[in-house]
Amino acid sequence: MKKKSPHDMSTDELMREINKLNSLLQDKLRIEHDTEEREYQSLLERMIGRRIQITLEGNALYGQEAVITGPHGDSKKPMYWWFLLSSGEKIYKARTSFKLLPLESSSETK
């Protein structure tokens, strides 16, 4: 059966079609949001607590190590991160201003 053109539909038929599409759209948006939230939580788990080295040449903190404490701002794809320096000072830098240091294996920390 060929689908009717919207111009050939009654008001009730058109409303049913709109409601069906709206429901599909809401489901799709919910799935996308849930996926984005899972990816964000995974990123936080990977980044928070990681040791970094500041690589921004010309910066007074160049070469210093710090620990990531969380994202700076509300973005789900953070470009800036908060760090805790060994001095106890908390600062933030762009993702391009540091490099992640290798993870310490559990055998090294024992």
Image (cartoon, grey):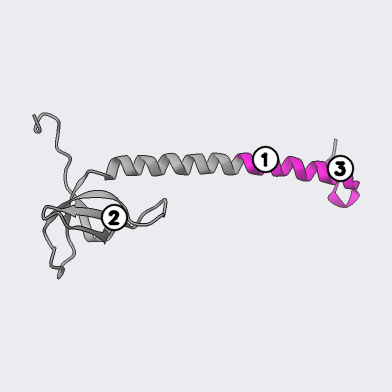
Residue sticking out furthest to the front: 88
Q: Mark 3 points at which residue?
A: 13
Task: Mark 2: give few (<14), some (14-19) or many (20+) Cα within 10 Å.
Answer: many
Task: Mark 1: give few (<14), some (14-19) or many (20+) Cα within 10 Å.
Answer: few
Q: Name the residue under label 2.
A: 81
Residue at screen point 10% across, 29% down: 107
Q: In this view, does 71 lie above or below 1?
A: below
Residue at screen point 55% across, 39% down: 31
In the foreground, 100 or 60:
60
Q: In this view, does 77 lie to the left or right of 89?
A: right
Q: At which x and y percent is residue 22? A: 70, 44
Residue at screen point 21% across, 45% down: 50
Cα separation between marks 3 and 2: 52 Å
Q: Which mark is residue 8?
A: none
Q: In this view, does 95 lie to the left or right of 16?
A: left
Q: At which x and y percent is residue 43? A: 34, 44
Q: What stretch is highlighted in magenta?
A: 3-27
Q: What residue type is labelled 3?
A: Glu
Say which element carries label 2. strand
Q: Nearer the viewer, mark 3 or mark 2?
A: 2
Q: Mark 1 points at which residue?
A: 24
Cα separation between marks 2 and 1: 36 Å
In the foreground, 72 or 104:
72
Say which element carries label 3. helix
Cα separation between marks 1 and 3: 17 Å
Residue at screen point 16% across, 43% down: 102
Q: Quadrant of the C terminus?
A: top left
